[in-house]
Amino acid sequence: MSRTSPFVIALSHTEEQVLVETSRQYTAPYYKVIRSKIVLFAASGMDNERISQLLDVPRRVVTKWRKRFYYERLEGLEDQARCGRPRSFSP
């Protein structure tokens, strides 16, 4: 039995355009494409379990990005600063 998420996503027209554009880019990093698709599926009314099955990612990953987008919108989909030693190799 699937549970409904308390984080109901409603997108503005601009947010939807940005997410659709990102999810269709071949040159975008994989993590950005997956995060965009998670939010788009969530906005269409899908539950977390179904989204995780479609994208082949764990349900907790879907829950995390849905919640981050709900609170922080598009800025929440970017990586946050991490603690620890700085990178020694360039990207």
Image (cartoon, helix red, strand yellow):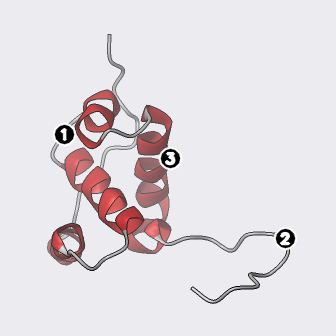
Q: Which mark is residue 45?
A: 1
- Asked if residue 54 lies left or right of residue 34, the reply is left
Amino acid of disc 3: Lys
Residue type at mark 2 is Gly
Residue carrying label 3: 64
**Residue most extreme to the front:** 89
Q: How many marks?
A: 3
Instruction: Report the front residue among 23 and 14.
Output: 23
- Image point 21% across, 47% down: which residue? 41
Q: CA distance from mark 2 to mark 1?
A: 38 Å
For the residues carrying marks 3 and 1, which lies nearer the camera in this image? 3
Residue at the spot of label 2: 84
Question: Are the two marked residues, 2 and 1, in contact with CB atoms closer than 8 angstroms?
Answer: no
What separation in Å lies between label 2 and label 3 (alpha carbons)? Answer: 22 Å
Mark earlier in primary sequence (2, 3): 3
Packing grade of label 3 (10 A; few <14, some 14-19, many >=20) is few
**In x, y percent, where is residue 45?**
18, 39
> Which quarter shows the C terminus?
bottom right
